[in-house]
Amino acid sequence: MDRFVIRGGKPLAGTISVSGSKNASLPIAVAAAILGTTDSVIRNVPDLRDVQTLRRLLRHLGTETEYSPASHTLFVPASESLGVEAPYELVSQMRASIYVLGPLLARFGRAQVSFPGGCAIGTRPVDLHLRGMEALGAYVRVEHGYILAQARRLRGAEFSLRGPRGSSVGATANVMMAAVLAEGTTVVHDAAREPEIVDLGRFLNRMGARIEGLGSSTLVIQGVSTLRGAEHAVIPDRIEAASYLIAGAMTRGELRVSGAERRHLSAVLAKLTEADVWVDWEGDTCRVTVPNGIRSVDVTTDTYPGFPTDVQAQFMGLMCLGDGVSRIRERIFPDRFMHALELQRLGANIQLGEGEAIVRGVPYLTGAPVMAGDLRAGMVLILAGLVARGETVVSRVYHVDRGYERVEEKLRAVGADIVRVSE
């Protein structure tokens, strides 16, 4: 396994570019591969571990995609026939593999998908995915760790995708990709509003789908008989952008983040401003500085447009250096605090409660060996290592490779002392 060796204390300065969105690229690639009857070209696709895992899954189903890391372009050929089984050995590596369920069912009438894997950040049930398929007329059962679904043809319906913690991004994407080929009209209430869902919907509409209400909590989908391939450029990764903004703030440098989409970052920018972090914009580039110190503020995660759970860990890292006490509440995944124990190893003062963490700012962090337990936990440990006194060694960085493209190269280019060591 690779690990990162970081020597902290160097302010970041220069410009760091934001890659394309991982969470938009994956469902868009699935839609292109399974639903399109002609070839598709998807641009701005990041070179990530999860993208390579998805390509292996699509190859197993019968589609041989081509990817150019230099141009970040994914070519997806059309397929007349595909396999319908997504096996455990591939699905267990990445939760987004469940995205094949809806499109396989819609186009080929059957799907056999292993229960998904990915980051272990608490219980993330697939109930809403299954409820959506059943609402569209599919017969769904679970046997031996597999979801088995079949339908002669899906039928439009009106239903809600609201779960115990609000709307589900994954279930919304799956239902959209199924409903576009369903017979009649589908109305989805309590749909996810995230920018990645909007981007998927725009791509589907370019393929010939008829989806209205993108960006709202109610989607109206008129079913069509076939979809063609399309060309599309994926939106910037808002989580990566937020992570690098926080990196600039924690290291007290003068970092510029380019290629970000400001309107996708509203909740994060509001909390950074409240924490006395200055973010100045020029077009799609923003400069982050901390002239007066970091103010401790409270934050509560929520579905979009609220504060994203995928930035909770990184923001906790920032609050570790605040001038007071911060209360961080996690409404989406109440158990998503694996990073807190590792931050404590670096000298952070964090007290965990049920679904929340109390963070008391400390003057400095100190280097130590730490371990990434999931994707975003890995990123905050890197950020903490950048400011810690001495050497920090972050192991299990394959988690970080799932969602951050060449993270050590990008950070090194703006002044970080970070190297990847392969065992």
Image (cartoon, grey):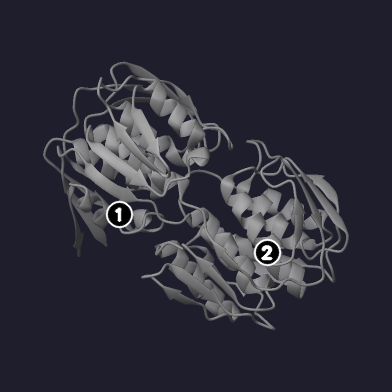
> x, y percentage for residue 299?
46, 25
| Residue 164 shown left or right of residue 121 in the figure | right
> x, y percentage for residue 218?
76, 42
Seen at 37% across and 37% down, the residue is: 314
| Residue 348 shown left or right of residue 84 in the figure | left
Seen at 84% across and 60% down, the residue is: 137
Seen at 57% across and 64% down, the residue is: 232
- Note whether 226 is above or below 420 in the view shown: below
Q: From this viewpoint, which residue is outermost toward the right? A: 184
Which quadrant holds the C terminus? bottom left
Q: Please identify the quarter of the rendering in which residue 249 is found.
A: top left
Residue 351 appears anywhere in the view = yes
Seen at 55% across and 44% down, the residue is: 123
Q: From this viewpoint, which residue is outermost toward the left? A: 390
| Residue 232 shown left or right of residue 46 in the figure | right
Say what amino acid the circle numbered 2 marks. Arg
* Kind of element beneath mark 1: helix
Say what amino acid the circle numbered 1 marks. Val
Q: Which residue is mark 1?
A: 407
Q: Which residue is mark 2?
A: 206
